[in-house]
Image: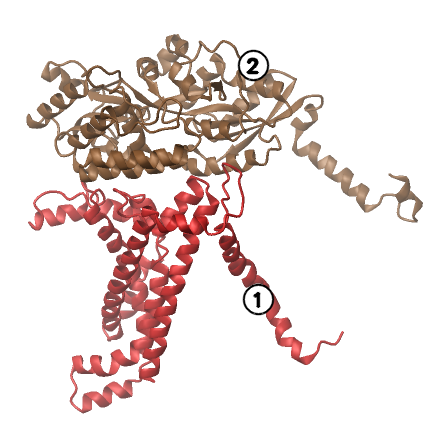
Amino acid sequence: MAVPRRAWPWLLLLPTGIALGAVAFWPIFEGLRLSLTNTSLITQSSDFVGLENYAGLRSDARFWNAWWHTIWFTFASTLLETLIGLGMALVLYERFPLRGIVRAAMLVPWAMPTVVTSKMFGWLFDGQNGVVNWVLLNLGLIGEKVNWYGDPDTAMTTIIIADVWKTAPFMALLLLTGLQTIPTSLTEAARMDGARGWTVFWHIRLPLLMPTLLIAGLFRALDAFRVFDLVYVLTGGGPADSTETLSTLAYKELFSTLEFGYGSTITTAMFLTEAALAAILCLWLVRQIRRVT
Amino acid sequence: MSTADSGRSRPSIDRRTLLATGAAGLATMALPRRARAQGRVEISFASASFFGNETFGDLVNSFNESQDRVLVRWLELPPPSSSTEVYQGLVQQLARRNGTPDVFSQDVIWIAGFAAAGWALPLDEFISDTSGYFEGTLAACKWDGKLTALPWFMDTGMLYYRQDLLDKAGAQVPQTWAEMAALGKAAQDAGDAEFGYLWQGKQAEVLVCDAVEAIASNNGAILAEDGRSSRIAEPEAVAAIQFLHDSIGSISPRDVLSWDEEPSRQPFTAGRAMFLRNWSYVWPIAQDPKVSEVVGKIGAGPLPHFDGGRSASCLGGYQLGMNANTKNRDAAWEFMSWVSAPEQQKRVALNFGLGPSRPALFDDAELNEKQPFMATLRPVFTGATARPVTPEYAKVTLALQSGISKALVSGEVEAEMATLSQELDRIVG
């Protein structure tokens, strides 16, 4: 059978379309549909309830508590990872002995499964036997052992530190590739004109690196927003809900209480927040890139 | 070969026949047991997989070999450490209402939910005399006045203490929380122990267990008898949570706020604490010279209580249930009653280290000889107290974990309990 010429591209796109539809769009629509029902595996109900779940969500203190924690975690970890990653990338860009090995070794934290990282940080920051307390005590920076995961004031910070340790190298790698695309002729010309390190960084490298920086930051922020394993392993959301994030809250609602309706409302709200976050960052990104190019 | 096939001009053995005979042949080869299954009622038994010197599969095989009426197939669920997954697995199967699995084992906290959903068959018509079981366990097996689960094995919270330090202080095992706190404080001040009392305050299921024990030992309760209203803002419960809060920083380190079972066990077996609240698994670890500094120095017994109260220990463990949609009730009951009978409970106690739900077994000579520790648990199990019995337990426990954790952290126990009480009323009301 002869396929019309104009149909070919669509035909070739079809397998991808079906695959994407099955694994990306269908779950989203299914989640959206469930969020409008009172589906529960326990009561076996599955009725359409309109926006009732969303009304409940609006006045659900647990949800807003988790929402703010997630936003704070995303903001703090992305900012720190971008700054530290940038510093690491600038160092790794320079020539020094064994640079190849250092570049490879730097990726180890990122390659480690997050559950392993979590367990490791659990021990590092352990209140009784943790090496962090030991070092800080011996340096005289703290008067007594701090219970990092048992205190609402420090639990989230500790989780952010663990995430930064794990993901800063990944940011560094992305930014390093960005740095390598900047033509050396530009920096050489600047140097001939008498520009020093700081000036070269501020006026040449940083503006040209900006698109990469923003894209990497966007990826990181969207990824950080879904934080689950660190919280799940280290604190389970406690103490006093101080580390509860949207992912852990949704998990509890979906899989502990088996309330698929309300649980899906939480995940849909999460999806919408993340979409809004992505839209804002993308708009900003496009404007920045236009300014540079 | 069917006539329809031979009507066509095909080779004498067609593909379908070949496949069918081949499959039948394979089946006989791979599953010799199936051949013996003829004439027997086949039922299935779903259970979390516990491990010991044998598995539950071995237990099921023994049943199959012991008689020729019923053949049980074991559906293996994840281990109890993944209890959320075990729960999901059971719910998904029971919700289909197709009678599979016919028999299942369930964590005590799911019993009410399964019964209220109509998935677990009331067992009163099969059993009239339940006097052979612990009363606390039977209470947890009932929903709406009906017995919907048959007691199997159990574990409860208990007090571990350092006998050597008690002897040094010339003291008896403390009966009340106040006595325990005083002894713990004295040992701390004398430098005998770094910590007086270790427990579990992490925002997790175990926090609910610790809270149930404290509250029930002060004649309080989390929910009212009928499970439809909260009692957690009553003075008894508030005083109990206040005690837990006040222990932090005096006889317990601040770390208990982030500790579940294992982190709290480690300092105790390292010889750094005088008292510990934990489950029965701690005993063999504490008696292992390779990992323990307190071999031969410790004892275990019922938890303390408040003045005028009685010792309470939070009940855990898996109990047996019958699927309400099973087509083979008699066969299911035959298996259930067999596996819960004294001989099998003893076997489970010896080979898995899981505590029997029948008090009489604690007088058994062989059990006393091979599991001397378990034999001492009778007084502890006698005080077994159920966690709130409600079909909404999954929601209740999340609210409790959050509310009690807030009270312990902020110290505003009365206010937090009042808020929590409203939340509980909303869930169960």
B367 over B98 or under it: above or below? above
Mark 2 residue crowding within 10 angstroms, few (<14) / some (14–19) / many (20+):
few
Could you tell me residue A228's position as x and y percent?
36, 51
Could you tell me residue B26's position as x and y percent?
70, 37
In this picture the colour scheme is: by chain
> Which residue is label 2 attached to?
B126
Marks 1 and 2, how far apart at CA: 58 Å
A156 over A286 or under it: above or below? above
Could you tell me which chain the residue with mark 2 belongs to? B
- Name the element at disc 2: loop
B76 over B274 or under it: above or below? below
Query: From the image, which quarter does the N terminus of chain B lie in?
Result: top right
The quarter of the displayed image where residue A239 is located: top left
Q: Which chain is red?
A: A
Question: Residue A115: which disc?
Answer: none
Q: Which chain is brown?
A: B
Could you tell me residue A285's position as x and y percent?
34, 74
> Closest to the observer: B214 or A198?
B214
The amino acid pointed to by label 2 is: Phe
The amino acid pointed to by label 1 is: Thr
Q: Nearer the viewer, mark 1 or mark 2?
A: 2
Q: Residue at x 91, y 43 (%)?
A: B6
Count of numbered marks: 2
Could you tell me which chain the residue with mark 1 belongs to? A
Residue A164 is at least partly visible in this image: yes
* Residues indicated by labels 1 and 2 sit on the same polypeptide chain: no
Question: Is A258 left or right of A59, judged from the image as shown?
Answer: right
> Which residue is label 1 attached to?
A16
Mark 1 residue crowding within 10 angstroms, few (<14) / some (14–19) / many (20+):
few
Residue B81 is at least partly visible in this image: no
